[in-house]
Image (spheres, grey):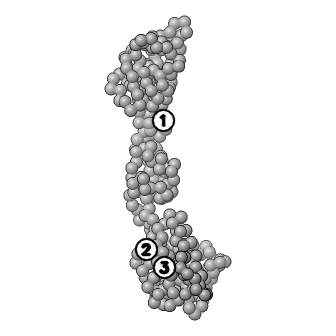
Amino acid sequence: MAFLRVVPLEKALEVIKSFPLEPRVEIVPLEKALGRVLAGDVVSPIDVPPFDRATVDGYAVRAQDTFMASESEPVKLKVVGEVNAGDFPDFELKPGESVYISTGAPLPKGADAVIQFEDVEREGDEVIIYKPAYPGLGVMKAGTDIPKGKPLLKRGTRLGFKETALLSAVGIAEVPVFRKPKVAVISTGNELVPPGEELRPSQIYDINGRAIADAVKELGGDSIFLGIARDNRESLKNLIEKGIECCDIVILSGGASGGIRDLTSSIIEELGEVKIHGIAIQPGKPTIIG
């Protein structure tokens, strides 16, 4: 058994990375994906926007119908309808026609420009145009923001609100994420008392249990605080075995130095293997990895 044979921190990290702790993958709804880590690359399944849309309130036209418009000789187009955001225009503009359209609304077939209403005049069922429009004026083409098939997010990305908004924009309702590692946390020591209980002489409140459990959560894991093991073999071994049974990783605080009451290393050796006992860091020199 390795016992206080101090190794560099880099060596300790190599040992940890060598453990077979391949994360498992689960599918979660987008509303529960915040803070989770993507388990696969994501590409856009659609164009965003999914259709050519107006960027201004005005009149959708065939640009070629306006090419001869001027202040002295304006062009008049017949207004044949109205398209608002959320509408589906199931008609096609014919030569000499236009349609009133609101910002965000899809262009009817045949239209390739939108002239904002401030630049025209309306007389009855006609719109009067004083300057030419060009194809694409006042229009956002399908896929301008995000084209279909564009890589959006890479495996390993932690999802913040910007990332979940991006996934919403392309209609993704579920995402593959790495399952949060379950980490059992155990404090050790006869002197420890849980916060909220009355302190007796020679006792102190347990700080490390709360700190480690919350650090695990802050880093993206699920922590389970199993309680305080007393300085006897049965108490400590029972909690370690419980942690092994319910979790992926067990973290103990205390009980790792060379003192006569420190049983951790012998119990780990009994249940498995002590890989490292001693790291060249301060504080933390007596750390055990097993």
One can see residue 109 in this view: yes
C-alpha gap between disc 2 and disc 1:
46 Å
Residue 177's spot in the image, x, y percent? 43, 59
Question: Where on the picture, by quarter, is residue 211?
Answer: bottom right
Mark 2 vs 1: CB contact within 8 A: no
> Residue shown at 60%/87% (left/top)?
201
Q: Residues within 10 Å of mark 3 (few under 14, many from 20)?
A: some
> Residue shown at 53%/89% (left/top)?
231
Q: Secondary structure at mark 3?
A: strand
Q: Nearer the viewer, mark 2 or mark 1?
A: 2
Q: Nearer the viewer, mark 2 or mark 3?
A: 3
Amino acid found under the numbered disc labelled 2 = Cys
Residue 227's disc is 3
C-alpha gap between disc 2 and disc 3:
14 Å
Q: Residue tagged by mark 2?
A: 247
Amino acid found under the numbered disc labelled 3 = Gly
Mark closest to the chain's N terminus, 2 or 1: 1
Residue 132's spot in the image, x, y percent? 52, 15
Q: Nearer the viewer, residue 122 or 21?
A: 122
Amino acid found under the numbered disc labelled 1 = Thr
The correct choice, above or below, for 92 with respect to 32 in the image is above
The correct choice, above or below, for 265 with respect to 90 in the image is below
Q: Residues within 10 Å of mark 1 (few under 14, many from 20)?
A: some
Q: From the viewer's perspective, tell me whether residue 10 is left or right of residue 112.
A: right
The correct choice, above or below, for 235 with respect to 280 in the image is below
Q: Nearer the viewer, residue 10 or 242?
A: 242
View extreme (bottom): residue:
260
Q: Residue tagged by mark 1?
A: 144
